[in-house]
Structures are given as structure tokens and as C-alpha cells.
């Protein structure tokens, strides 16, 4: 008769991987031109997705993926900063883009293991987005609907058991 | 919280073990009074009987149409994570079911009327029943997640479960119409202790490529969980009066319902009998301590979206909270206390039986010889019988069926044994044995299913056990 070993339950790992979009920023070139100065946008906002206990207490590691595309006629800088509950900056990711035509910039940032500290993710409760115009404020790209976009998604492993 | 934990644990384990309610050993086992409970039209020859309270009928049924304990916990050197992934997550399908059934007779008795063609039976029993089907897509989401599964819809209808605990008060009439036909009916009052059901869920969760952002997550849900009695039992547990609350709800203090059993036995000829019964044609109306939870709507999100120049209009905008509010508005999670009706899991039995061999003396009271007795509607009892039985039960994913072949042997009026071979979704090798022992007025019966599985209980897909103790009188010394 085959025997059973119920202590195997202790070895059972339930570690799914979830992914979803994080933040999307879209700024038409007309808005950049209308801002006039170098800094055309900067805003802090609440972002509690990572701070929820069910996530922050169980997340093991993950990757944030960014796609940045510039179809405007000017060089631009975009920055995304992760803030803790007191507004302190935990992490910064900056993107510099040449005027169109230019390729989509994809960047993947790992957290946990050999990547950046997971505490950045666990303690994030806000995001600051800012954009800087490094060109002029009058020209307009000949491409249709010129704009700068920042797309982002997260893929994280979470220990359920 | 313990009850909630127990509630969800039950659902989980029900996903791994399936229990059926087929009582193929007891069916048409006319030496045992409890055979009236599975066919109120069974032929009876008792003058009266009385079940020993709480011991007259105990039945437990268990099995698995998916995996067994051994499939996961065998000491075979394999990684349990691989076994769970291969045998449960990917190995089971949504028709693999999980449920549990037990029945405990609290009171049981019966007596023959002044007109000997009528036999009346009555009693109270407590029954627990739960069923769930393998929630495959939920399990994939929980064990593996949605990553790298673009465009794969996770089907929310895979959550299909129901369960209850109920006390049943019943009174049955068994009438011998003539020497060929016996019919019976049993009225039932159900007193529900608790109930939960979530059987008509629809919708999906899917991750697709986003229109603006990288990914779009869509939830299209039409889900409902209805419960009654759960909150009161939780409160009772916190207050330390769980037992008295169960008693109160079980004795007309919960939700009530009505039901009916019907049955017959018909002699095609002297030695061939067909029988049939329809059990638990009934419903329970839940109006007391009802909680219904719904999740209904469709939402697609692509993360926090900051689109200029619109986003500039409110520098204090809380994009995250706006997103949460939008999802909650599109897919509201609501609860209410409206009453609802549940229908009992209706069961159907049918059989054909061929009697042969030695004719046994009738035990029924009668101032007559055997031949006259037969003229009064009584028939010989034979030492041997064989035949086939059909069993069907209405379940959330449609009827389940079992086919049984049986052989019954009487050794005088002392001992009767019945062996069965049953084929159903749980097993193709289910051999059962039931024994009824009559020691004077004392009747003891023991029945067990799937005997081959006892070589390794942990590896069985099905097992059941029934026992009972009665006092029976045929009116003879």
C-alpha cells in the first residue's frame, strides 16, 4: 500500500504572476507649446495600488515596463518618480527623447532579486510625473497628432502561500 | 471568522472530493425500514418499527471524480507543486465535482394502520449537503496568475457551488393497492439551518493589449452568492451559543420549505418487480437572515490615465481614487437581504428485480395460511434476488446518473446480504456490500461502498458508509 506524506503541504508554493498597466501619460505638442517654459507638466498624485496590504505584504519581485514615444518636433525629458507616504522620492526613472522621427523607447526595470530594492515598490503610495521641453515652444511636428506618450505596466510575482 | 474559514475551506475541499447521495445498497432492501426513505412505495411487512434515536440511520458518502488524496500526498518523491499543477490545475476539468452529504436520523418510526394495507412512517433527520465544481479558471488565476496570458478569458462561470444543512420532518403513507402494486408518498417540512449557493455566475476576466496603455484589463461579471443563516451562526459562534442556535434554526426557527417523495413497487409477475421513486420534490423559501452578494457590470482599465490638457483642469485630481471609483461604479459589489427560493436536489430511483430460489415464510401477521395470504395481497419472499437499478440526481451542471447491478441473498429471516456493482462518474469498480441482521426484534444494518478502495483509502475516488439500529415487530411471537 502506498503511503502518504501530508507534510508535503508545507512545500506547496502558490506564487502566481500578475500583470497590469500602471500609468499612461499623453501630452499633445500643442499643450507643450502652450506651456511656454521648459517645464510643461508636473503633478503628484496618489497611487495606492502597491500599498494595498494584500499586495505589499506578499509581492516577491517584478518588472516595470515603460514605452515612451515622442512624435513632437522637440527634444523632451519625461520623469516618473515613486513617492512614499510623506512625499519622499523612493525611485526615479527619466527618459530623454530626440525629436521625431525617433523609435519607441522601451525600458524594463527589475525590482527584487538582482534588481532595485523591493522596498521601493512596497512603500510607494504616490507618483510624480513631470515633463520638460528641451526645444522650442513654437514648432509643430508634421506627423499626425504629434504628442509624447508614456506607457507603463507592471508584472509581479506574489506569494499567496 | 471560524465559520467563514470553515465555509470556504469546505468549498475548497469540496473541490477535491466529491460526494454523492446514491443509496444503491439501501434501495429496495426491504428488510431494512429505512428503505422507505428512498422509496416510500417499497413493499413492507412490518407491523411497526422504531429507530433507536440518533442511531437508526447514519450515512456518509464520499468520493472524488477528479483527484484523490493520494494523487497529491503520495510519498512518491515527486514535487508537490508539480503534482498540484499537473493533476489538479491542468488535470481536472469543470465537470469534476465536489460535494459532501451526510444524513443523521434523529427520530424514526412506523406502524401499520387498522387497515393493514396502510403503513405509516414518520421521523426527523438532519442532512448536510454541499456540492461544488472544480473552478478551473479561478485556480489558474490563483496558482499561475494572468501574466503572459494575453487574450485568455478566465471564465467566471467556473464558480458553481451550493450547500446547506437542514432538518427534515416527514410523514409517509405506504399503501398496498392490490397484490401487484404498492404506492407511497411522503410529505416533508424542511427547516433550513443554513444555505449558500452561487450557481449562475457568468462573465470573464481578460487581459488584452491596451488601446492607450500597454495592457487593458477587462472584468465582465454577472455573479451572485446567496446565503441564509450564515450570519446568525457566525454571531452565535462569537457569543458561544452555536449549538443552541443550530437547534433553534433546525426546529422551525430558520427558513422553511415543503417537499414530497413519491414511489411505487409493481409486480410484473410472481417473481419480477419493478420499482421507482422520486425524492425531494421540494423547495425552501429563505427569508430569514438572508445575505445576497452581487457583482454585476463591465469595466476595462488601463491603469491611471493622465491625458493633457484635460488633466490640467484640476491640479488636485486624485487619479487613483477616480479609477477606483469608476471601477466600483461600473462593476458594483452590492448586497441585499431579499428572500429567495432554493429547490432541493431531486433524486430519481428505478429498479427491476427478479426473485428466485427458496420461498421464505412470511413474517407478516396474518390468521391465514400462505396461499390465503397471497390472495390478500401478500407475496412470497424469496431467498435470492438480482436486478438492476438506476439513480439520477439533479445537480447544478445537469443530472448525474449511476447504474447498479445487484444480488441479494436471504439466509432465513436472520440475515440478509446485498452486494452491488455500480458505475458512475466517480468509479467503474464500485463494489458494495450491505448486511441486515435480525436478532429477535433488533435490526442492525451495515452498508459500505467501493470495498476494493479500502486497500488504499487515500487513493479512492468514492466511498460511503451507512449503519442503523431499529426495533422491528411483525406482530408475531
Image (cartoon, coloured by chain):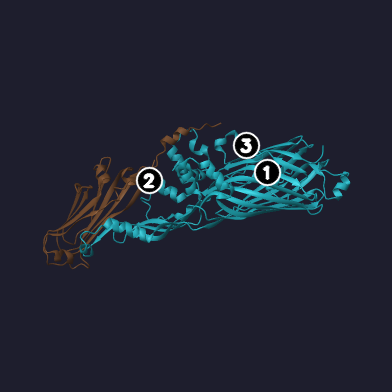
Chain colours: A brown, B cyan
Residue B361 at what x, y percent from top left? 83, 40
Identify the residue at horizontal 26%, vertical 46% (top origin): A121
Task: Give the CA separation, mark 1 to mark 2.
Answer: 52 Å
- Element on which disc 3 rests: helix
Across and down, in percent, residue B247 comes to: 56, 44
Label 2 residue SS: loop
Q: Residues within 10 Å of mark 2 (few under 14, many from 20)?
A: many
User: Counting residues from the N terminus, which is met first, the one under dot 1 or under dot 3?
Assistant: 1
Residue closer to the observer: B311 or A140: B311
Q: In which quarter of the image is the C terminus of chain B?
A: top right
Residue B254 place in picture, x, y as percent: 55, 50
Whether marks 1 and 2 lie on the same chain = no
Q: Which label is found at residue B108?
A: 1
Determine whether, in the image, residue B176 is placed left or right of residue B219.
right
Q: What residue do we see at 85% from left, 50% from top?
A: B376
Q: Is residue B67 above or below residue A2?
A: below
Q: Residue A61: give x, y in percent of width and height.
A: 30, 43
Residue A30 location, quadrant: bottom left
Q: Foreground: B341 or B407?
A: B341
SS for tag 1? Answer: strand
Lateral position of residue B151 relative to residue B161, left or right: left
Task: Give residue B276's mark.
Answer: none
Crowding at label 1, few (<14), some or many (≥20) Cα neighbours within 10 Å?
A: many
Disc 2 designates what residue? A16
Which residue carries the number 3 mark? B452
Q: Which residue is drawn at 23% across and 55% down?
A: A45
Q: Quadrant of residue B439?
A: top right
> Spatial distance from mark 2 to mark 3, Cα to Cα?
39 Å
Say whether marks 1 and 3 touch (CB < 8 Å): no
| Quarter placement of the N terminus of chain B | top left
- Asked if badge 2 and badge 3 are on a common chain, one would say no
Are the residues flagged by discs 1 and 2 in contact, CB closer than 8 Å? no
Amino acid at each position: 500500500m502506498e503511503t502518504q506524506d501530508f507534510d508535503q503541504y508545507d512545500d506547496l508554493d502558490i506564487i502566481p504572476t500578475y500583470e497590469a498597466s500602471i500609468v499612461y501619460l499623453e501630452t499633445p505638442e500643442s499643450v507643450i507649446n502652450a506651456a511656454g517654459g521648459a517645464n510643461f507638466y508636473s503633478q503628484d498624485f496618489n497611487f495606492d495600488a502597491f500599498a494595498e496590504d494584500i499586495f505589499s505584504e506578499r509581492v516577491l519581485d517584478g518588472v516595470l515596463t515603460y514605452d515612451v514615444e515622442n512624435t513632437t518636433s522637440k527634444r523632451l525629458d519625461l520623469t516618473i518618480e515613486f513617492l512614499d507616504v510623506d512625499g519622499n522620492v523612493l525611485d526615479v526613472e527619466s527618459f530623454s527623447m530626440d525629436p521625431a522621427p525617433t523609435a519607441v523607447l522601451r525600458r524594463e526595470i527589475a525590482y527584487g532579486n538582482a534588481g532595485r530594492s523591493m522596498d521601493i515598490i512596497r512603500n510607494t503610495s504616490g507618483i510624480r510625473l513631470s515633463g520638460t521641453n528641451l526645444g522650442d515652444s513654437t514648432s509643430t511636428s508634421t506627423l499626425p497628432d504629434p504628442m509624447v506618450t508614456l506607457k507603463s505596466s507592471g508584472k509581479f510575482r506574489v506569494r499567496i502561500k | 471568522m471560524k465559520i467563514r474559514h470553515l465555509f470556504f475551506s469546505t468549498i475548497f475541499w469540496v473541490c477535491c472530493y466529491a460526494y454523492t447521495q446514491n443509496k444503491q445498497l439501501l434501495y429496495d432492501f426491504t428488510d431494512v425500514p429505512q428503505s422507505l426513505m428512498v422509496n416510500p412505495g417499497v413493499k413492507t411487512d412490518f407491523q411497526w418499527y422504531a429507530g433507536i434515536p440518533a442511531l437508526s440511520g447514519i450515512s456518509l458518502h464520499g468520493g472524488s471524480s477528479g483527484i484523490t488524496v493520494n494523487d497529491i500526498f503520495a510519498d512518491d518523491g515527486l514535487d508537490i507543486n508539480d503534482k498540484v499543477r499537473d493533476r489538479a490545475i491542468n488535470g481536472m476539468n469543470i465537470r469534476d465535482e465536489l460535494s459532501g452529504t451526510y444524513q443523521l436520523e434523529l427520530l424514526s418510526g412506523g406502524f401499520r394502520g387498522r387497515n393493514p394495507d396502510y403503513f405509516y412512517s414518520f421521523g426527523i433527520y438532519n442532512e448536510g449537503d454541499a456540492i461544488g465544481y472544480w473552478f478551473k479558471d479561478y485556480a489558474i488565476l490563483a496558482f499561475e496568475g494572468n501574466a503572459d496570458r494575453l487574450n485568455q478569458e478566465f471564465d467566471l462561470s467556473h464558480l458553481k457551488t451550493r450547500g446547506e444543512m437542514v432538518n427534515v420532518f416527514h410523514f409517509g403513507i405506504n399503501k398496498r393497492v392490490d397484490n401487484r402494486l404498492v404506492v407511497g408518498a411522503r410529505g416533508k417540512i424542511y427547516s433550513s439551518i443554513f444555505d449558500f449557493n452561487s450557481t449562475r455566475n457568468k462573465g470573464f476576466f481578460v487581459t488584452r493589449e491596451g488601446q492607450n496603455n500597454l495592457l487593458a484589463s477587462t472584468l465582465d461579471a454577472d455573479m451572485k452568492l446567496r446565503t441564509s443563516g450564515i450570519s446568525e451562526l457566525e454571531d452565535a459562534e462569537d457569543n458561544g451559543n452555536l449549538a443552541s442556535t443550530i437547534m433553534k434554526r433546525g426546529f422551525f426557527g430558520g427558513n422553511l420549505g415543503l417537499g414530497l417523495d413519491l414511489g411505487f413497487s409493481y409486480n410484473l409477475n410472481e417473481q419480477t418487480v419493478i420499482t421507482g421513486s422520486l425524492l425531494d420534490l421540494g423547495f425552501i423559501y429563505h427569508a430569514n437572515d438572508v445575505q445576497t452578494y452581487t457583482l454585476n457590470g463591465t469595466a476595462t482599465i488601463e491603469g491611471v490615465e493622465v491625458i493633457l490638457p484635460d488633466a490640467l483642469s484640476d491640479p488636485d485630481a486624485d487619479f487613483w481614487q477616480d479609477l477606483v471609483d469608476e471601477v466600483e461604479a461600473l462593476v458594483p459589489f452590492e448586497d441585499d437581504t431579499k428572500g429567495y427560493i432554493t429547490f432541493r436536489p431531486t433524486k430519481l430511483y428505478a429498479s427491476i428485480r427478479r426473485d428466485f430460489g427458496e420461498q421464505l415464510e412470511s413474517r407478516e401477521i396474518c390468521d391465514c395460511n400462505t396461499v390465503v395470504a397471497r390472495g390478500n395481497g401478500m407475496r412470497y419472499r424469496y431467498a435470492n434476488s438480482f436486478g438492476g437499478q438506476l439513480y439520477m440526481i439533479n445537480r447544478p451542471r445537469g443530472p448525474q446518473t449511476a447504474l447498479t447491478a445487484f444480488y441479494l441473498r436471504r439466509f432465513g429471516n436472520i440475515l440478509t446480504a446485498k452486494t452491488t456493482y455500480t458505475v458512475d462518474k466517480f468509479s467503474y469498480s464500485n463494489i458494495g456490500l450491505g448486511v441486515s441482521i435480525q436478532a429477535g426484534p433488533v435490526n442492525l444494518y451495515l452498508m459500505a461502498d467501493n470495498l476494493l478502495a479500502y486497500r488504499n483509502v487515500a487513493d479512492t475516488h468514492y466511498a460511503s458508509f451507512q449503519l442503523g439500529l431499529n426495533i422491528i415487530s411483525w406482530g408475531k411471537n
